[in-house]
Image: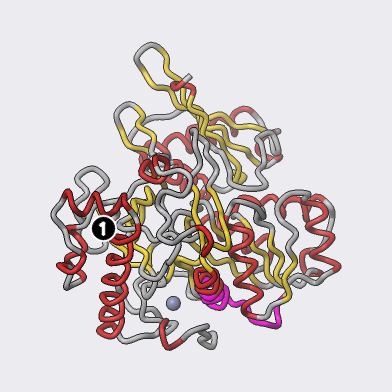
Amino acid sequence: MEEVRCWEPEYECMDREDLEQLQLERLQSTLTRVYRNVPFYRKKFDELGINPEDVTSLSDLRNLPFTTKDDLRENYPYGLFAVPLREVVRIHASSGTTGMSTVVGYTKNDIKTWSNLVARILTAGGVTKDDVVQIAFGYGLFTGGFGLHYGAERIGASVIPISSGNTRRQIKIMQDFKTTALVCTPSYALLIADTIHEMGVNVNSLSLKYGLFGAEPWSEGMRKEIEEKLKIIATDNYGLSEVMGPGVAGECLERNGLHINEDHFLVEVVDPETLEPVEPGEVGELVITTLTKEAFPVIRFRTRDLTRLITEPCACGRTSVRMSRVMGRTDDMLIIKGVNVFPSQIEAVLFEIEGTEPHYQIVIDRKGALDEVTVYVEVSESIFFDQMKKQREMIEYIKKRLAAELGISVDVKLVEKKTLERFEGKAKRVIDRRKL
Ligand SMILES: [Zn+2]
């Protein structure tokens, strides 16, 4: 077994009772601050007749109001900041795909905390000060690049802030600078792996050991594919700009769920429809309350991410609760023929089928009143150029597997390798023409 390394063992391996006491103290102080400094929260608390002093146990959290992405948009840009702007040293924003973006701020202390929490995640994923970390996340308003950058520097690793894109150059740098850890989205890691192969670079000649991937949901099959192609240990990490950015949770080398930094984030899992807590271990929407953030605290923020909590102890020795890999977002959920379908379910099936490439696209159309789904799947050359009979068999097999998984029938089309678009950041795998 790997030697257990923690960045802050005094917190990461904390006794449960002590942790809960710390969480409660931090929650009370956060509530007092938002009530005093953020009119939005004061109004909401007053409407519900809640005084921060009434919160005397962690279970009282259930009485507090939720915060949604819409609340953030309506308070654009600085309405939810809990400190004056002169105390803010950094501003990030999430991309506004559907209109206004959401803006978040950090004090000096927030940046320090953030770096520390990302350092925990990097350490859990195998990174030490001896590593050369190539950060192929976009730098800019997106929190991914800067978040990982500061954490890796905090550890004392050698950081290459290459940002995303220019894949061949990424690989040249990887060779020349002897990169040992790669940080990016899983779909970009896959594109890098395929480009390494195309360029005829022997992956064994690289120094890569670890890959730390996040910012989009991915499947276990995709992890295996990346690990085999890049000859690395790949871990998953989780964060979102509204809550802090990367550093909320990350996997240890056991690769069996993401340890949540619970001394800084109080998590709940609720039914996205009723907003009631799900049974322990059940899948639902992750809700996060920040416990230490100064500039931009959030109370019961609805992440829209679907996951479940794992409370069984982890072999690594960390005592924190883990979350399973994100299974999808409530807004990614497709309702097809009245059935709830997540793109990640389709991905998981495709990764299990021999001969398919890890690239696919889901196109949804409406013919009359009926939804029609076509899954385009890249297949290996041998299958694509094989006899029609074999292709038909493959299509039938994929259709059968998908129907069993999804509970609805979908159409499947095989396409030649490299037909579908590749992504340097977050992948876009669904084209829903019904909305047009
Ligand atoms: Zn662990």
Q: How many labels sit on residues?
A: 1
Res. 19 visible in picture: yes
Q: Closer to the camera, 148 or 406?
A: 148
Is 117 inside the magenta-drawn segment? yes
Q: Residue at x 64, y 81 (%)?
A: 128
Q: Closer to the camera, 333 or 395?
A: 333
Q: Is residue 320 above or below residue 140?
A: below
Q: Residue at x 15, y 67 (%)?
A: 54
Q: Closer to the camera, 341 or 94?
A: 94
Is 235 inside the magenta-drawn segment? no
For label 1, the SS is loop
Q: Quadrant of residue 322?
A: bottom left
How far across and down, in percent of the image, does residue 292 sit? 40, 71
Does residue 244 appear left or right of residue 428 in this picture?
A: left
Does residue 370 appear left or right of residue 418 in this picture?
A: left
Q: Closer to the camera, 370 or 214?
A: 214
- Ligand 1 falls in quadrant: bottom left
Residue at image mark 1: 282
Tell me the amino acid under the disc marked 1: Glu
Estimate how packed mark 1 is, as few (under 14), some (14 to 19) or many (20 or more) residues with alpha carbons within 10 Å.
some
How far across and down, in percent of the image, does residue 359 sit? 60, 42
Does residue 368 appear left or right of residue 421 in this picture?
A: left
Q: Which residues are magenta?
A: 116-131
How far across and down, in percent of the image, does residue 124 sit? 52, 76
